Image: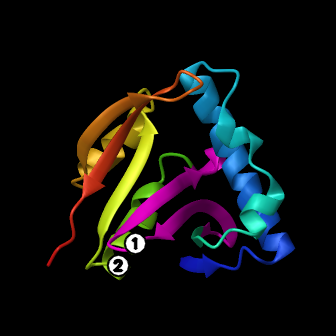
Amino acid sequence: MIKRLNNYNLEVADLIQNIFHHSYVVEAELLKVDDFPPLKRTLGSYQNSENLFFGYFKNEKLAGVIELESLENFIDINSLVVHPNFFRLGIAGGLLDFVLDNYKFYSFKVETAAKNIPAVELYYKFEFKAIKYFETDCGIKKVAFERFSVK
């Protein structure tokens, strides 16, 4: 089941941060980096964010979260994370399906680390196109994807 998360609620923000933290620890290991900026994100940044958060629940446990920023003519997928206990169960795909179905008339943008092969493959599977490769200030090579709306 997927539902909107009230990130302004401290307990919910704490659950969101927990999922993000566990997922990003695995990603940092995958990328072989010690300094991974997403791991430094504070509880307050989740709680005070104006972005939309949707959670995927499996057996009544929050298993994954997608964070969306609605901009003028597109949706920026700021984050898509799954708790490691729920990897490879279709949760990320379920969250993407949900967003693509519920925001049909928007275009979408997302970035991920180029070495994050599971994420890269997921975006290609959902017909996102790689539009730019770049390196962050902390040396992580990234790829930006875009998917145009169905009009």
Dot 1, crowdedness within 10 Å: few (<14), some or many (≥20)? Answer: some
Residue lying at 35% horizontally and 43% vertically, measured from the top left = 144
Residue lying at 72% horizontally and 40% vertically, measured from the top left = 39
Tell me the magenta residue range: 57-86
Nearest the viewer among 26 and 108 is 108
Q: Is residue 91 magenta?
A: no
| Disc marking residue 103 | 2
Up-down relation of residue 128 to residue 61 (above or below): above
Nearest the viewer among 138 and 98 is 138
Up-down relation of residue 60 to residue 42 (above or below): below
Q: Are the two marked residues, 1 and 2, in contact with CB atoms closer than 8 angstroms?
A: yes
Residue 86 x %, y %: 59, 51
Amino acid, disc 2 = Tyr
Residue 147 x %, y %: 25, 58
Q: For the N terminus, give its image quadrant.
A: bottom right
Residue lying at 60% horizontally and 24% vertically, measured from the top left = 138
Query: Residue extending furthest left?
Result: 151
Amino acid, disc 1 = Val
Q: Is residue 62 left or right of residue 151?
A: right
Q: Is residue 143 left or right of residue 136?
A: left
Q: How is the image coloured?
A: rainbow
> Quarter-wise, where is residue 132 in the image?
top left
| Element assignment for label 2 | loop
Residue 90 x %, y %: 43, 56
Residue hosting label 1: 99
Dot 2, crowdedness within 10 Å: few (<14), some or many (≥20)? Answer: some
> Whole-Å distance between the Cαs marked 1 and 2?
6 Å
User: Residue 16: in sight, yes or no?
Assistant: yes
Residue 140 x %, y %: 51, 25
| Element assignment for label 1 | helix
Q: Is residue 78 magenta?
A: yes
> Quarter-wise, where is residue 50 in the image?
bottom right
